[in-house]
Image (cartoon, rainbow, N blue to C red):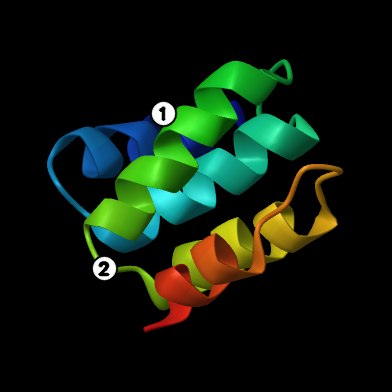
Amino acid sequence: PERARRWCRAAAEAGSARAAFVLSDWLRKGYGGPTDAAEAGTWLRTAAKRGDADALVELARNELDSKQGNAATAFAYLE
């Protein structure tokens, strides 16, 4: 798992939207190393900016699940 996480990070740093999304998930879950919620969020937003559909859906879901969530913001991620 540690080696996979290193390769995934390298791909994300090289510009892969999908690797950025996967890395965010692994950082959140602790796959291949310690959890890091802040870094996971950074990679999730990076993946979304790069156009990863799963990242956009996850951001929309997070927006709707938050106490101060905004439906308009959530839907904007999905446009």
Mark number displayed over residue 6: 1
Up-down: is 39 above or below 67?
Answer: above
Q: Residue at x 86, y 43 (%)?
A: 67
Q: Residue at x 65, y 68 (%)?
A: 71
Q: Is residue 20 visible?
A: yes
Q: Split into 4 quadrants, where in the image is the N terminus?
A: top right
Pinpoint residue 58: horizontal percent, then vertical percent: 61, 63
Which quadrant holds residue 64?
bottom right
Dot 2 crowding, Cα within 10 Å, few <14, some 14–19, many 20+ = some
Whether pointer 2 and pointer 1 mark residues with C-beta atoms closer than 8 Å, the reply is: no
- In the drawing, does residue 14 fall left or right of residue 39? left
Q: Is residue 31 visible?
A: no
Name the residue nearer the viewer: 26 or 50: 50
Q: Mark 2 or mark 1: which comes first in sequence?
A: 1
Q: Residue at x 35, y 53 (%)?
A: 47
Pinpoint residue 27: horizontal percent, then vertical percent: 63, 31
The amino acid beneath tag 1 is Arg
Q: Which residue is mark 2?
A: 51
Name the residue nearer the viewer: 65 or 27: 65
